[in-house]
Amino acid sequence: MKGFLIKQALLIFPVGLLVSLLAFSLVRVFPSDVVASYLKAHQQTYSPENVAMVRARLGLDKPIIDQYFDWLKKAARFDFGQSYYGNLKVSEIIFMGLKSTLQLTAATIVWLLVVTYFLGLYAAKKPDGLVDNISRLVAILGNAVPIFVVGFLLIQIFALKLGWLPVSGKLSFKHVILPSLTLALSNICVYARMLRNEMLDNSKKAYVFYAKARGLRTSWIFKKHIFKNSLLPMAGTSGICFGHLICGSVIVENVFAWPGLGTVITYAILSRNYPVIQGYVVCVALIFIVANLCSDILTALLDPRVRLGSAP
Amino acid sequence: MKPAAPNAPMARAARSGRPGWPIRITLALFILMVMGLATILAKYLAPHDPVAINISNSLAPMSWDYPFGTDQLGRCLFSRCLYALRVTFGASIFIAFLTILMGSIIGMTAAYLGGLVDQIVRVASDALLAIPSMIFTLIIVGFLGPGTQNIILAMLIANWVWYARVARGLTLRIREYGYVRAAKLAGTGHLGLMVWHIFPGLVTQMTTQFTLLIGTMALSLAGFSFLGIGIQPPTAELGLMISDGCELIQTHFFQMVWPSLVLILPVASLNVIGDYFTDYWRSKQ
């Protein structure tokens, strides 16, 4: 297990290198004209002398290998240059966005944990019961309704009709409730179903039979024995779940005007702000690698079978 | 072991009322059939031109002439929904099919050939899987620029790798089966072995994945349209129509509801069918 974790941790370097190559080369490979975007952003005309000036400023006149290493040296220190718009450093923009996005994600995870726990537990207690059918319906809808529709419906109900919560922006604690709920809803269905299925599978196993034979109460067996064992696969997918949350947050942030990474990248794409996109690629890839590593470590911590090397 | 008849659930449907053929499948198939017909016959069913602007008739209420009313520019919402259904699901089926085909062929070839090719595909897929496909699509569109062709290309590049992985795992298993070895002994060439003996073994799995992927692709397309980096207006596309409707949610609630329903119903039906078959094949194994 230790070897596996070290291998996973060491994987950061090749994957990071590959991602950096990707971030760097995409600008060169695809028919996107960096100089034109730069000139447009600075409201200058597309004349030969301007083009030459910009090429020199961006270092485009050097050989491509040199360009890559220059870029990589800076990228390793999270220096992705200046944004084309405004007088901001890309790293500052990314860092501010990342902070907001992580706040949103954290709030979402709270929703996820609480609702998944109750929905999964009660659905598993009575298969085909009321809660189970509700969670099944939520799962079907949650996988079919676009996330921005959910967001607008929640705004309509809780912010405009009832007036309990603010519509959008990021000013107080109240502002985080609706976006995080929207983001959680589409994931809750998946995880509640997963927990329920895991628990039903587990309840047929021998250790449950043994616990019953020992005369333990059914509710106790459910909460202590079955539930704990069902958490393992969930911990294993927590890295992927985090990925889903970051993906979903791109749209949710746009619905609620939440100033996170999602709004940053959308504006960057629409305005062809290449340094910001490059910074975003590297930053997001690193987050995912770390998240996957954390979920592996979590699984190992929770399950002695994985930790000691005998596969479950 | 006798291979399972591929139409076993269908046969069971004939003797309906038996467990194993839930009512939700019938319902889902019915919805898909109606939507499919609507897509094919859009030209005859649509009462108006989907892109004909008539400002004097903007935001008209529902009527016989305009079954869903009209949008902000006075375009018939019902006709737009019909054509948008065609665009959205046409594009998603196209992307899903190519993604699965590409993934299957690359995964199968890599697993069959083994060695260096397999290693390269594995390392590449590990690196690609480090980034979720939606973010990857976003990034590629970021460099290509927004637009219909670009979004389709980006979604293809971002998604095939998941299916290559599935196909690779399956091929490794199928390769060892008796009938494949027998065919090899009988002197079938590499290509023949892959096309006639290994690929059919992938089809069942991949069909299920395909069913689920269409819905996912339709939803992502809608999401990208909402962000403004997908299919561009004035094309009638469900995601664009929904996001237009969302802006009017306070005053004209149904502007958003109709296109949403047209998107949600088929996607939900596809998911129900896909999940059913996933469970079905899992219980078979």
Image: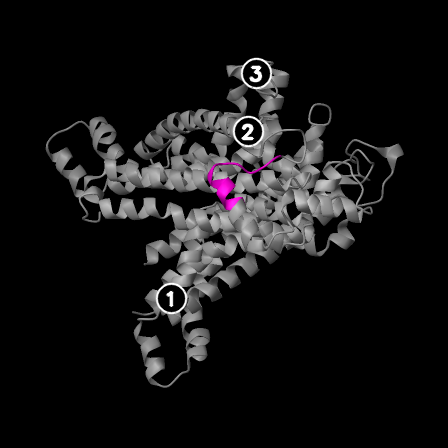
Question: Do marks 2 and 1 share a subunit?
Answer: no
Q: Secondary structure at mark 2?
A: helix
Q: Amino acid at mark 1?
A: Thr
Q: Position of residue B192 (x, y in %)?
A: 45, 79
User: Can you tell which quarter of the image residue A208 is in?
Assistant: top left
Q: Residue furthest right?
A: B56
In the image, B13 versus B145, the foreground residue is B145
Q: Amino acid at mark 2?
A: Glu
- Left or right of A198? Residue A95 is right
In the image, B23 versus A214, the foreground residue is A214
Q: Which residue is mark 3?
A: A171
Disc marking residue B171:
1
Q: Which residues are magenta?
A: A71-82
**Residue A94 position (above or below residue B224):** above
Nearer mark to the viewer, of 3 and 1? 3
Tag 3 near tag 2, CB within 8 Å: no
Find the distance from the CA under tag 3 to the CA under tag 2: 20 Å
Question: Do marks 3 and 2 share a subunit?
Answer: yes
Q: Residue furthest left?
A: A214
Q: Position of residue A189 (x, y in %)?
A: 44, 35
Q: Residue furthest bottom?
A: B187
Q: Amino acid at mark 3?
A: Leu
Q: Which residue is mark 2?
A: A92
Nearer mark to the viewer, of 3 and 2? 2
Nearer mark to the viewer, of 2 and 1? 2
Question: Do marks 3 and 1 share a subunit?
Answer: no
